[in-house]
Image: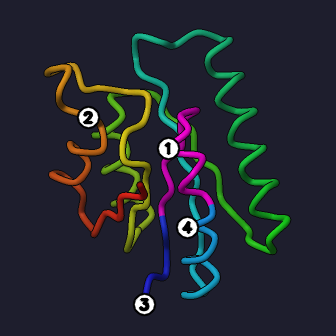
Amino acid sequence: MFNTILFPLDRSQESQSAAQLVANLVNHHESSLVLLSVVPEDAKTTGEFDAIAKMLEQAKDAFSQQNITAEIIERSGMPAFVICDVADEVSAELIVMGCRGLGLTQEGATDSVTNRVISLAPCPVLVAT
């Protein structure tokens, strides 16, 4: 049913908790998995990019231990927009993300990246709690 699942990651507990749900869905639907992390434009430092790259590699390794091959994509920009753009680029049929990651949108403290993705996504969004 879901040929490609996009899993945007950050270093939040919610994101990490969603990983097992993602693994179950990928195995059940025999989907391909794309791991994405977005570094906000205002946080473009070498240290931030290195930390994100390490986190993505660790996630890829964790999925690999469950016999799941994952593609890694790392981008910079406004997270919600980048997530939706990448979902479109990889023809994702499902986005799975934590209920509230580390980022809030620039528009306000009550608008989370997850809420923005739900509004803009080109495919269904499953929010793990």
Left or right: residue 25 versus residue 86 is right
- Which sits earlier in the primary sequence, circle 1 or circle 2? 1
28, above or below 88, in the image: below
Q: CA distance from mark 1 to mark 2?
A: 13 Å
- Which sits earlier in the primary sequence, circle 4 or circle 3? 3
In magenta, the rendered stretch is: 6-19
- Which sits earlier in the primary sequence, circle 3 or circle 2? 3
Residue 30, magenta (yes or no): no
Left or right: residue 110 versus residue 59 is left
The circle on residue 1 is: 3
Residue that mark 4 sits on: 21
Q: In what element is the residue under mark 2? A: loop
- Where is residue 53, by image quadrant? top right
Residue in the image at 64% along x and 82% along y: 27
Residue 17, magenta (yes or no): yes
The circle on residue 112 is: 2
- Which sits earlier in the primary sequence, circle 4 or circle 1? 1
Q: In what element is the residue under mark 1? A: helix
Question: Along the line of sight, which residue is nearer the eye, 127 or 44?
Answer: 127
Residue that mark 1 sits on: 14
Question: Along the line of sight, which residue is nearer the eye, 55 or 112?
Answer: 112
Q: Nearer the viewer, mark 3 or mark 2?
A: 2
